[in-house]
Image (spheres, rainbow, N blue to C red):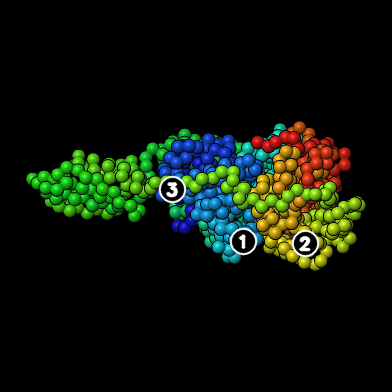
């Protein structure tokens, strides 16, 4: 038996019931807005309380998703929703936005927070950030290896949650703008259109109908649960809030059995039948086992579907109960039930003498008819010798069960009032910039022309081997850290660079790396930190960042609003190809073999003939991070200057932009 939580998805009440009645220890679901699966039915109004009560009564925890990035106008409603979840006694909220997490911690300190996988935590620095802010658990990135997980567990008290089954995103979670730039449907805001599941090719031609170079196979950790638990995973998460109740029932049942040490014969075949995208993988657990080229298929037989339906027909008795039946002649018959520290009593008619007294065994058998309730009788005692009719016992049992359920649910807490002023109290603006924006040029090669640059940001292809002739701006050089740095040995290469005096600043693109470069005078929170609102900007400055690059998903109006409060610290990206995806599985290597790329990997072409450049970072541990860049170059330089947005600097990333089509990104196109 493996002692770990099994966490199942619930896109609607049918899925929730399927999860609970098939053995989930906890479920996760959304409450309408502010969650990364807005396409699911989710739970609102009375349905939200009913869902939480349904789970609590059965001893199942509820983790509610608040895992999207927020605009300023959404901060107060999202915090108010968190207050409502605390009132309803939800067990935890899952959060991506660092600003919202900070607001919850300050206003609702008793509410348990889990860091969403969208936060991108994948190293010890990320866990230390969570620990310092009272965030109890990290939903780790799917790209973690078993050794990585063990290292984190051995060096941090933060709980570790890990996906054990379901869909695997090709891109690193929280760092994907593909859907956003392709059609205003943002994966960071719960409306991803999944363009990565469409046709794509790495052979330099338009993708064919059967080519899916970004569509990965699903993961199945069924045989890895013991190793993962030994490495420190305390919660195994099943993906699938958009999946059917039959899927949830089947996958939950099988993983429940596996954790209990009773994996059923043919389990992998059942998992494959209920839904698959080709052969299952273990992602990066033992090295890269990901493959692409897959589309989703489900082919369950009638027996599997029937079993799923049958699993939800009867209640799963989850609560142990003890009963005391009092039947003293001349006094009211009473039944007292106790479960989980709660007690309920039902009182019946006055007890009459018994002509032939029933044995304690028969009285117990009559009491132990809980039927379709959550209780199972584990202890029984009878007191008295009077006549206790079966009909009376049945009536008392039903009444006592109903009362016990209400007692166990408890009344909701009083809700803390939240409004816009509540949020404003925690915002610490620094005001707009008072001079024309400086120029921050971001480059990858030492030979690129950077004349007139105030700051030069260098993004090394080989962080372990950096040339000494990097251009320097008027205010110095900045080392750009990638969104993902896999492994402590890779991190060490960046630590050495930041300590050798070559750089006067650092640009950080993942919360896991927020501690790096603390000694440097310039510390930029890059676009990878997803600064989308005033609360996250405040949190970045509290972390010690001197400057902020806001999210590429903000419009002109939203940038202007942010600049009114933080323009003195804002560096606005105005030119360059937007990074759409961050890949730790290289599609070129999969289809064409490793080409030992030195910065330029090639092109990925979709079914419509659009080409997306691929570039890489090669880490000293032999791993590569491949970035897929936008097919068009974002150019808002003129529009930004004409707008008069009072920002500290504008950032340009000019390499590889020659001859490409131009877009203004989200300058005037808001994301959903």
Q: Residue at x 83, y 61 (%)?
A: 466
| Residue 671 percent location from the top left of the image | 68, 37
| Residue 663 percent location from the top left of the image | 80, 36
- Residue 149 visible, this orientation: no
Question: Which residue is denoted by mark 2 in the rendering?
Answer: 521
Going from N to C along the chain, the mark reached first, 2 or 1, is 1
* Label 2 neighbour load within 10 Å: few <14, some 14-19, many 20+: few
Q: Which residue is drawn at 69% across and 51% down?
A: 429
Is 578 rendered above or below residue 139? above
Is 547 rendered above or below residue 190? below
**Judging from the image, what secondary structure is the residue with disc 1 in?**
helix
Q: Which mark is residue 503?
A: none
Question: Which residue is denoted by mark 3 in the rendering?
Answer: 413
In the rendered image, the quadrant that contains the C terminus is top right
- For the residues labelled 1 and 3, the Cα–Cα distance comes to 31 Å
Q: Is residue 587 left or right of residue 88?
A: right
Q: Which mark is residue 128?
A: 1
Is 383 rendered above or below residue 406? below
* Label 1 neighbour load within 10 Å: few <14, some 14-19, many 20+: many
Q: Which of 511 and 535 is in front in this view?
A: 535
- For the residues labelled 2 and 3, the Cα–Cα distance comes to 46 Å
Mark 1 or mark 3, whichever is nearer to me: 3
In the rendered image, the quadrant that contains the N terminus is bottom left
Q: Residue at x 78, y 64 (%)?
A: 497
| Furthest residue in direction left, as rendered | 355
Mark 2 or mark 1, whichever is nearer to me: 2
- For the residues labelled 2 and 1, the Cα–Cα distance comes to 22 Å
| Residue 569 percent location from the top left of the image | 75, 52
Q: How many labels does the image show?
A: 3
**Judging from the image, what secondary structure is the residue with disc 2 in?**
loop
């Amino acid at each position: 038996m493996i002692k770990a939580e099994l966490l199942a998805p619930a896109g609607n009440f049918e899925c929730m019931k399927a999860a609970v009645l098939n053995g989930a220890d906890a479920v996760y679901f959304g409450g309408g807005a502010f969650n990364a699966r807005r396409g699911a039915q989710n739970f609102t109004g009375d349905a939200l309380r009913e869902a939480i009560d349904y789970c609590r009564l059965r001893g199942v925890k509820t983790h509610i998703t608040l895992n999207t990035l927020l605009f300023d106008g959404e901060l107060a409603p999202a915090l108010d929703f968190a207050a409502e979840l605390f009132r309803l006694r939800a067990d935890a909220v899952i959060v991506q936005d660092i600003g919202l997490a900070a607001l919850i911690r300050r206003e609702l300190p008793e509410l348990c927070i889990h860091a969403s996988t969208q936060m991108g935590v994948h190293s010890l620095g990320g866990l230390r950030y969570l620990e310092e802010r009272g965030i109890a658990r990290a939903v780790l990135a799917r790209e973690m290896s078993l050794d990585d997980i063990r290292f984190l567990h051995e060096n941090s008290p933060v709980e570790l949650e890990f996906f054990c089954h379901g869909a695997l995103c090709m891109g690193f979670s929280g760092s994907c703008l593909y859907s956003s730039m392709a059609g205003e449907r943002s994966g960071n805001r719960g409306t991803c259109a999944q363009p990565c599941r469409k046709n794509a090719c790495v052979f330099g031609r338009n993708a064919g109908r059967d080519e899916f170079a970004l569509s990965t196979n699903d993961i199945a950790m069924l045989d890895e649960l013991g190793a993962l638990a030994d490495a420190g995973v305390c919660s195994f998460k099943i993906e699938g809030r958009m999946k059917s109740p039959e899927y949830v029932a089947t996958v939950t049942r099988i993983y429940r059995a596996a954790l209990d040490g009773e994996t059923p014969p043919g389990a992998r075949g059942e998992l494959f039948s209920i839904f698959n995208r080709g052969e299952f993988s273990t992602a990066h657990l033992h090295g890269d086992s990901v493959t692409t080229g897959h589309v989703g298929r489900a082919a369950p037989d009638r027996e599997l579907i029937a079993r799923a339906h049958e699993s939800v027909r009867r209640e799963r008795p989850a609560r142990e109960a003890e009963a005391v039946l009092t039947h003293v002649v001349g006094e009211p018959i009473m039944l007292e039930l106790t479960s989980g520290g709660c007690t309920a009593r039902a009182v019946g008619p006055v007890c009459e003498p018994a002509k032939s007294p029933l044995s304690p065994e028969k009285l117990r058998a009559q009491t132990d008819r809980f039927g379709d309730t959550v209780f199972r009788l584990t202890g029984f005692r009878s007191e008295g010798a009077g006549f206790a009719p079966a009909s009376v016992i049945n009536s008392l049992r039903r009444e006592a069960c109903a009362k016990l359920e209400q007692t166990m649910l408890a009344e909701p807490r009083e809700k803390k009032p939240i409004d816009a002023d509540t949020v404003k109290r925690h915002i610490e603006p620094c005001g707009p910039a008072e001079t024309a924006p400086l120029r921050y040029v971001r480059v990858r090669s030492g030979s690129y022309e950077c004349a007139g640059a105030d700051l030069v940001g260098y993004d090394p292809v080989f962080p372990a081997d950096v040339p000494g002739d990097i251009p320097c701006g008027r205010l110095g050089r900045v080392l750009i850290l990638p969104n993902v740095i896999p492994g402590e040995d890779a991190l060490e290469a960046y630590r050495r660079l930041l300590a050798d005096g070559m750089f006067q600043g650092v640009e950080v693109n993942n919360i896991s790396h927020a501690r790096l470069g603390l000694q440097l005078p310039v510390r930029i929170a890059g676009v990878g930190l997803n600064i989308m609102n005033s609360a996250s900007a405040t949190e970045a400055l509290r972390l010690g960042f001197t400057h902020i690059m806001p999210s590429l998903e903000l419009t002109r109006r939203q940038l202007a609003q942010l600049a009114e409060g933080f323009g003195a610290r804002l560096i606005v990206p105005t030119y360059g190809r937007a990074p759409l995806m961050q890949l730790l599985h290289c599609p070129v290597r999969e289809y064409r073999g490793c080409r030992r790329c030195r910065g330029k990997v090639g092109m990925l072409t979709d079914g419509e003939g659009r080409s997306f450049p691929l570039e890489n970072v090669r880490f000293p541990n032999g791993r590569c991070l491949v970035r897929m860049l936008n097919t068009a170059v974002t150019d808002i330089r003129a529009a930004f200057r004409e707008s008069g947005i009072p920002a500290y600097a504008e950032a340009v990333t000019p390499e590889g932009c020659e001859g490409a089509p131009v877009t203004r990104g989200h300058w005037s196109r808001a994301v959903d």
